[in-house]
Amino acid sequence: MDVRRPFLGVLAGLLTVILLPAFPAMTHAGLPDQERGRGAAELSLDAASVLAIVQAALPETVTVILPGAGSAEVRITPPATVRFADGGVESDLRLALPVIGWSSRVRVRYVPDVRPDDGIVRLAAESAEPDVYLPVSLDLAPLLPPADLPRTVSWTLEGPDGRSFPLRCDVQGVHVGDDRLVIELGVAVRPGH
């Protein structure tokens, strides 16, 4: 599943509700044609939204190299919930390494960041601690792929007067609140068609 799909649906719905009433002010005729309106917005993703993004990023299996045993498959069962704590996102998922008969709940801590090279919001596993001793030397956190969200989202909205407005949102930052992941956006509206 494409990780961006749940994120883009939430973003489009929220910005439509937030920006549509503001269109008259953002499309003031005295502004240059290149850009009619600029602003800032915050997109808050609740636990269910973040859970969908994390679940979409996880593969069903990954292959690892075990010292002295060669390659082996690790099965991943996605988490059922996420929690927001200490500037990060935490979840419990299940990992199984059938070749050695090991299975355990694993507490994973994801840390959100905006990658400086391309501005993509990334939820990367910082740590992954199993409840049951893992009898082989294996760092679990790097096995879990990060959930990457797009840096720029663009689409066209219809204004109250029927004209269409190209809208562009660029990620400016990200932080974790008590009960949500907050993405800070710069918003620009171009002239209507």
Image (tube, helix red, strand yellow):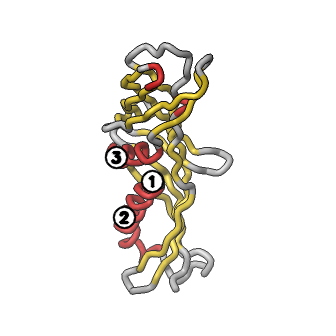
Measured from the top left, where is residue 163 in percent x and y?
44, 85
N-terminal of the pair, mark 1 or mark 2, is 1
The three-letter code of the residue at mark 1 reads Met
Measured from the top left, where is residue 94 in percent x and y?
38, 30
Q: Relative to residue 119, is residue 190 depicted above or below?
A: below
| Disc 1 secondary structure class | loop
Q: Relative to residue 180, is residue 75 depicted above or below?
A: above
Q: Relative to residue 139, is residue 168 depicted above or below?
A: below
| Picture residue at 37% right of the left edge, 81% below the top | 160
N-terminal of the pair, mark 2 or mark 3, is 2
Question: Disc 1 vs disc 3: Cβ atoms closer than 8 Å?
Answer: no
Circle 3 sits on which residue? 46
Q: Nearer the viewer, residue 106 or 153?
A: 106
| Disc 2 secondary structure class | helix
N-terminal of the pair, mark 1 or mark 3, is 1
Measured from the top left, where is residue 88 in percent x and y?
45, 33
Crowding near the residue tagged with mark 1, few <14, some 14–19, many ≥20 C-alpha atoms within 10 Å: few
Q: CA distance from mark 1 to mark 2?
A: 20 Å
Circle 1 sits on which residue? 1
Count of numbered badges drawn on the protein? 3
Q: Nearer the viewer, residue 93 or 108?
A: 93
Circle 2 sits on which residue? 13
Residue 91 as seen in the image, left or right of residue 190: left
| Picture residue at 33% right of the left edge, 43% below the top | 47
Crowding near the residue tagged with mark 2, few <14, some 14–19, many ≥20 C-alpha atoms within 10 Å: few
